[in-house]
Amino acid sequence: MKVAVVTVTSKNKERGGAERFYDGLVAALKAWDIQTDMIGLVGDESNFDRIKESLLNFYDTDLSDYDGVISTKAPSYLIRHKNHICYLVHTMRVFYDMFENEFLCPTPELLEQRKFITMLDTAALHYPRVKKVFTIGNTVSNRLLRYNGLKSEVLHPALAYDNFKPGKYQEYLFLPGRLHRWKRVDLIIQSMKYVRESVRLKIAGVGEDEEKLYALAEKDKRIEFLGRVSDEELVDLYSNALAVPFVPIHEDYGYITLEAFKSEKPVLTCSDSGEPAHFVQDNRSGFVCEPDPRLIAEKIAFLYNNPEKASTMGKNGKESIAGITWDAIAQTLLNALGLLYDRQTV
């Protein structure tokens, strides 16, 4: 049996959460003795003409030699195959929930582009073009139902890189990830202005908003930007942190939450942060508060002054995600493709 996992690669070849998701999915399918190939095409969203080119590239790709196809992020589900399921990472969010945020006064052309994308996505993900749609989280499923009228099944992905371990609870917060406005790193930097305790904030990652964030934090010596870090450094930074703040807007999933919990660290998130707010149990495995710098600062101060409570929360977080495994995910997907078989007979 041969399965193709169809993925979207960025034009600059950067790796992030989506790429780790792809790696984990392919490895999980191979563990079931399924010949699995990752078929990656570039998804260029720099302008609408490039978007249309990407759509056509996926639509024209011939995967008829495969017994089953699993598409992932937009626009990979434009692929055509008689045995096709989608494990949806997300649609093009700039045309969905983030449209009003990005375009305060959209032109008629932008509104037509949005209409085109949403209608195309609806048709592409509709049965029988796709036998079944799974999503990585409730936030993605709710968005798909709201804008496209399509029902889906949530299948939380496990970690692909899973060397995380608990360590000490030192006096710093660790915030990894892309430095982009949708991740709202600025919200945590602003909250530090109201934190009187000597807790530090270590920020790892690069992104489009680096300069703005550097400028916002320059007067606070407690804030340190680490840039890119290796996997080994990432593990150590999680391991010895006091807690992990993660406050994006409408996040689709966010491996950061799982990585923090695996490291037995509490997560501080916001009520509008999407899937992180689904995972974090308020006052049990972290805090879920309104996106207000003062309120966030209060939670930071509490964790700093109550390290034993932070430790308990972290352990609760780790326990809460124990049931998320790639083996179970692969089994569900292969069953949906009709390719499930007993490994004992191989």
Image (tube, grey):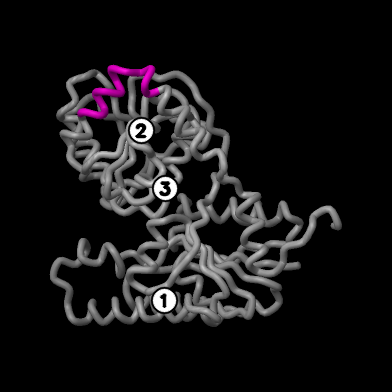
| Crowd around label 3: few <14 · some 14–19 · many ≥20 (10 Å) | some
Would residue 203 be visible to someone looking at this image?
Answer: no
Q: Name the residue under label 3.
A: 254
Give the residue drawn at x 63%, y 80%.
Answer: 82
Q: What element carries label 1?
A: helix
Q: Which residue lies furthest to the left in this view?
A: 105
Q: What element carries label 3?
A: loop
Nearer to me, 321 or 73: 321
Q: What stretch is highlighted in magenta?
A: 298-310
Give the residue drawn at x 69%, y 62%.
Answer: 36
Residue 6 on the magenta segment: no
Q: Is residue 122 above or below residue 86?
A: below
Mark 3 or 2: in front is 2
Q: In this view, does 219 lie above or below 181?
A: above
The number of callouts visible is: 3
How far apart in space, not on screen, are marks 3 and 2 (Cα)? 15 Å
Q: Residue furthest right?
A: 345
**Residue 324 x/y as whole percent:** 56, 45
Image quarter for residue 192? top left
Q: Name the residue under label 2.
A: 286
Work out which quarter of the rendered image holds the C terminus and state it: bottom right
Asked if the residues shown at circle 1 and circle 3 are in contact, with their CB atoms under 8 angstroms apart, the answer is no
Residue 306 on the magenta segment: yes
Give the residue drawn at x 32%, y 76%.
Answer: 48
Q: Earlier in the sequence, mark 1 or mark 3?
A: 1
